[in-house]
Amino acid sequence: MTATTQRRRQAEFTSSPRRQRIAKRTQPAGSTVTSSLKAGLIGGFGILLLMLISLVPFEFLACLVVPGFLVVWLTTGLLAGIFAGDSVQNSHQGGKVGWIAGFWAGVIGGIVAMAMAAFGAIMGSFGQNVVSQFTPDQLAQLVNFGLTPEIIALAGRVSGALLVYGVIGSLVSGLFSSIGGMVYPKLGHQ
């Protein structure tokens, strides 16, 4: 009789976690993606503001830009968790939501940086360094094809901004935003 009672109790205990797992899976997956995109847009706007602030020649503002990026990235992950609400139950889920939000914020920052580089606001010396890699004979041949040194410098600035701010910036933004997303469930459940 003792064995029968224990088997019944074991069956009761094992059935309730299955019900909880099924309930978690039935939550809409689109809510986490939507919340990540919303937070990514807000984070991208924050990155835009910081990039514009970095253009101001006042040195005190320039030293606030790097910590500002860290705050924006971490806050983007936290916002993604807040927007996801009950869909984020643990740090792993918060990290996923934060990663997506940070990645999209970084993509927006990369697009803004490419536009700023196209107008010559950033990466100016990088474009000139690309032009200096060509010999005068090569530059003369490129001019015959319609590629002036100014166009080559423009392409160098924009491609440099794409690499530095777009690709690397999106990965760094995603990393720090995932940390912010991992922190959210720990703050929300206290």
Image (cartoon, rainbow, N blue to C red):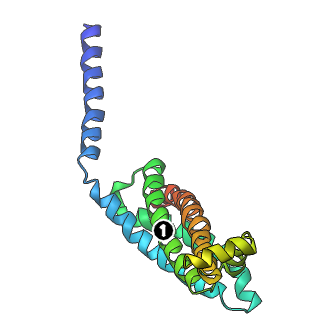
Identified at 24% across, 37% down, the residue is 19
Identified at 52% across, 69% down, the residue is 75
Does 11 sit above or below residue 190?
A: above
Q: Is residue 167 left or right of residue 41?
A: right
Question: Toward the viewer: 188 or 6?
Answer: 188
- Number of callouts: 1
Q: Is residue 73 left or right of residue 188?
A: right
Does 48 sit above or below residue 106?
A: below
Identify the image quadrant of the N terminus: top left
Q: Which residue is mark 1?
A: 107
Residue 39 at x, y percent in the picture: 42, 70
Residue 77 at x, y percent in the picture: 49, 64
Question: Toward the viewer: 72 or 13?
Answer: 72
The amino acid on which the numbered mark 1 sits, given as a three-letter code, is Val
Does 92 sit above or below residue 104?
A: above
* Circle 1: element type: helix
Residue 177 at x, y percent in the picture: 53, 62
Question: Toward the viewer: 146 or 152?
Answer: 146
Q: Quadrant of residue 113?
A: bottom right
Q: Is residue 182 left or right of residue 23?
A: right
Identified at 55% across, 75% down, the residue is 145
